[in-house]
Image: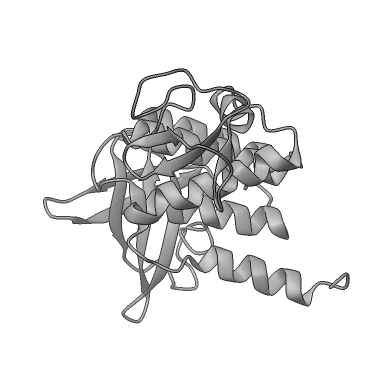
Amino acid sequence: MAQAAFVIHSRPYRETSQLVEVFTREQGRQSLVARGSRQPRSPLKGLLQPFVPLRLTFAGKGELKTLHSAEATGPAIRLAGPALYSGLYLNELIHYLLEVQTPFDEVFDVYHDTLQQLALGSALEPCLRHFEFYMLNVLGYGVDFTQDAQTGAAVSGRGWYAYRPEAGFVALDGPEPGAYRGDWLLALAGLELETPEVLAAAKRFSRTALAPYLEGRVLKSRALFIKGKRGSPSE
């Protein structure tokens, strides 16, 4: 059965083949060997790239399956500069957070939609934060921004709160280093990311909440983004 898919990562394998990590709509993450795909006349040559909507057939009993066919179902989603680094970041999140061979059809659709938003020039930070929050909720790691995790009381817009990993936000007596203001949390609950303060709070929360599940890995996309900023003419 042919499946909608995107390539998340690929690398050379032996002399003429590739090992390809794909994210499929029907069967989630899959590891495939694309035999002969690097040969000059292979119909797969140049096709197995990130951000190209594909339809694939593959088979195999183990974790590493064999790719039988691939065809593009649309033009490549064109990403450049910071949008490209952002797309690579989404791929790393998919790779590290989603369990292999487990269907995540809704995540596939949200991932595809987020790539299209990036290609259309939507603001990067809100796009990434929406995707991160979505992933945390899908995986069961999300928190309630509207309720004190310790007392159950409603979050006050005038209060200050600390984030407790794997629990949620708890009230403080006043502002402390790293604390979140209550009105920021209420904005995050509604994904209202219009102000710089709320965007900064969203980014800080996402990094803290995702860190345990990334297990200390240094994401290559972040390094590329920082390198790109340092090399830009405005820096």
Please identify the residue farthest to the right as the structure is shown.
Answer: 234
Q: Does residue 188 appear to the left or right of 42 in the view shown?
A: right
On the question of residue 132 being in view, the answer is: yes
Comparing 17 with 196, the one in front is 196
Looking at the picture, does residue 196 appear above or below residue 185?
below
Say if 127 sits above or below 44 in the image: above
Q: Is residue 69 visible?
A: no
Query: Which quadrant does the C terminus fall into?
Result: bottom right
- Residue sticking out furthest to the bottom: 15
Q: Nearer the viewer, residue 62 or 149?
A: 149
Residue beneath the point at 58% across and 22% down: 190
Residue located 65% across and 65% down the image: 225
- Quarter of the figure that contains the N terminus: top left
Q: Measured from the top left, where is residue 75 in percent x and y?
A: 63, 43
How is the rendered protein coloured? Answer: one colour
Residue 15 location, x and y as percent? 35, 81
- In-image side of 112 versus 122 (left or right): left
Q: Is residue 149 left or right of residue 7?
A: left
Q: Is residue 120 left or right of residue 17?
A: right
